Image: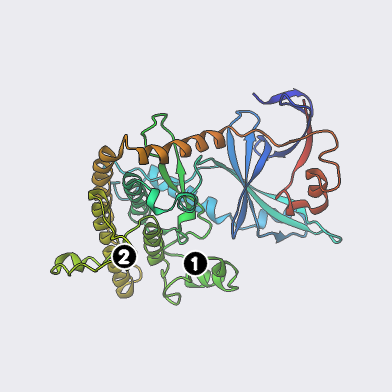
């Protein structure tokens, strides 16, 4: 257990030094390791000294120049924190009743603050650095999973649960409040995975995260153009938003981006919904040297579910073209069908060797991430040329983003 052994010194069981972060709300955190780099922020794993809980620290890449620390009071509220606070208010007081058993899931912000920090370099200037702390989703993102395992390894029950939970969340965002809220950046690396149950057969939960580009339906086209005007962020994304000249154009992007995520999670093609109603086409002979694709019963059910989502996405595009202010189509049927498929597929997959080979390492990884130890440098390690402390002192936020201090540990 981490604790203060004496003023300015942390009890870790190892002598040396640690990198520490303080917050205006009184919490103290210790650096564990870098976690991820995004278009808008960098993320680090840190441990809360009071609770010993591993959490995520996010530091904004966009620094606003300040004439003085008093200018912090003039800063616009952080978009992500504002949208999430609005969503949480809607859940407490929805203008439309939530469907029974619907549970929206998005990442939890612990705290957020704007800090005055001197930039590094020969001519340091005062800048505003935004720092926030978040509850950890202990299994990374859906993108990490697909990158590590590929579509052949994803159990159908898990893909179905992801569809159900993401669709639940989107449906609440679109219908529960006085106006729609759109995520606007819903790709596979912004769907976070978290194991909660200790059962070896329990599936994880899926949370929407990174709401830095989110907006309400009433936010203007001018604001949208301001976000994408310089092209820096758009260039880092897979594709530009469709229909960029229209109000609410990115409402279609949520469904389209999520659909492309699902397409990456399966090993079979997803035809249009109309092909189900048409007479069956003659089977296509396999390519020379390639075995024909044989789909399981569960994969066939998943294919039909994805076809429904593809159809709803096309309907949303038509609605948006006719009336940009209309709400997207209901996702209640998608949630219902996805939950039925999840239950049926899980019965078939539980106990199989393939399911066990997938679940065991991912659960172990989740346990390891949740029990991270602080980074400790000892003796001259941190002070030596090229050592972590020397590099951080020389390059500042290029090595450890955001303000930090060094504390002794023992």
Q: Is residue 376 above or below residue 402?
A: above
Q: Is residue 106 left or right of residue 337?
A: right
Q: CA–CA distance between discs 2 and 1?
A: 18 Å
Q: Is residue 46 visible?
A: yes
- Name the residue that disc number 1 marks: 238
Mark 2 element type: helix
Residue 117 vs residue 273, the one in the foreground? 273
User: Mark 2 against mark 1, which lies toward the viewer?
Assistant: 1
Q: Is residue 85 left or right of residue 403?
A: left
Q: Is residue 176 visible?
A: no
The numbered mark at residue 313 is 2
Q: Quadrant of the N terminus?
A: top right
Horizontal and vertical percent position of residue 383: 85, 41
* Residue 288 position by quadrant: bottom left
Mark 1 element type: loop
Horizontal and vertical percent position of residue 216: 44, 60
């Amino acid at each position: 257990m981490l604790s203060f052994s004496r003023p300015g010194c942390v009890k870790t069981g190892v002598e040396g030094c640690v990198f520490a972060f303080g917050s205006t709300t009184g919490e103290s955190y210790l650096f564990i390791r870098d976690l991820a780099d995004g278009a808008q922020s960098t993320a680090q794993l840190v441990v809360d000294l009071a609770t010993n809980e591993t959490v995520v620290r996010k530091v904004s890449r966009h620094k606003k120049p300040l004439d003085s620390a008093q200018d912090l009071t003039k800063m616009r509220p952080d978009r992500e924190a504002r949208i999430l606070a609005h969503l949480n208010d809607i859940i407490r007081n929805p203008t439309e009743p939530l469907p029974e058993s619907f549970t929206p899931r998005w990442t939890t912000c612990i705290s957020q603050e704007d800090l005055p920090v001197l930039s590094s370099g020969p001519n340091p200037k005062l800048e505003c650095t935004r720092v926030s702390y978040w509850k950890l989703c202990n299994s990374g993102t859906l993108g990490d999973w697909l990158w590590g395992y590929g579509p052949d390894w994803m159990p159908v029950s898990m893909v179905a649960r992801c569809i159900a939970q993401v669709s639940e969340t989107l449906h609440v965002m679109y219908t529960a409040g006085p106006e729609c809220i759109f995520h606007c950046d819903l790709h596979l690396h912004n769907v976070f995975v978290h194991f909660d149950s200790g059962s070896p057969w329990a599936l994880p939960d899926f949370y929407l995260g990174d709401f830095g580009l989110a907006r309400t339906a009433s936010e203007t086209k001018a604001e949208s153009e301001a976000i994408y005007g310089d092209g820096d962020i758009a260039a880092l994304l897979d594709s530009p938003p469709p229909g960029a000249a229209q109000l609410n154009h990115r409402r279609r992007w949520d469904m389209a981006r999520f659909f492309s995520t699902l397409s990456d999670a399966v090993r079979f093609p997803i035809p249009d919904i109309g092909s189900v109603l048409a007479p069956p086409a003659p089977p296509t002979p396999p390519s020379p040297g390639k075995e024909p694709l044989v789909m399981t019963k569960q994969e066939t059910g998943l294919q039909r579910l994805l076809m429904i989502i593809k159809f709803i996405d096309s309907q949303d595009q038509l609605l948006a073209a006719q009336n940009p202010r209309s709400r997207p189509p209901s996702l209640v049927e998608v949630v219902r069908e996805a939950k039925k498929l999840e239950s049926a597929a899980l019965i078939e997959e539980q106990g199989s060797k393939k399911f066990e080979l997938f679940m065991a390492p991912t659960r172990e990884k989740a346990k390891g991430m949740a029990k991270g130890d602080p980074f400790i440098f000892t003796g001259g390690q941190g002070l030596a040329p090229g050592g972590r402390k020397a590099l951080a002192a020389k390059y500042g936020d290029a090595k450890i983003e955001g303000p930090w201090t060094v504390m002794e540990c023992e």
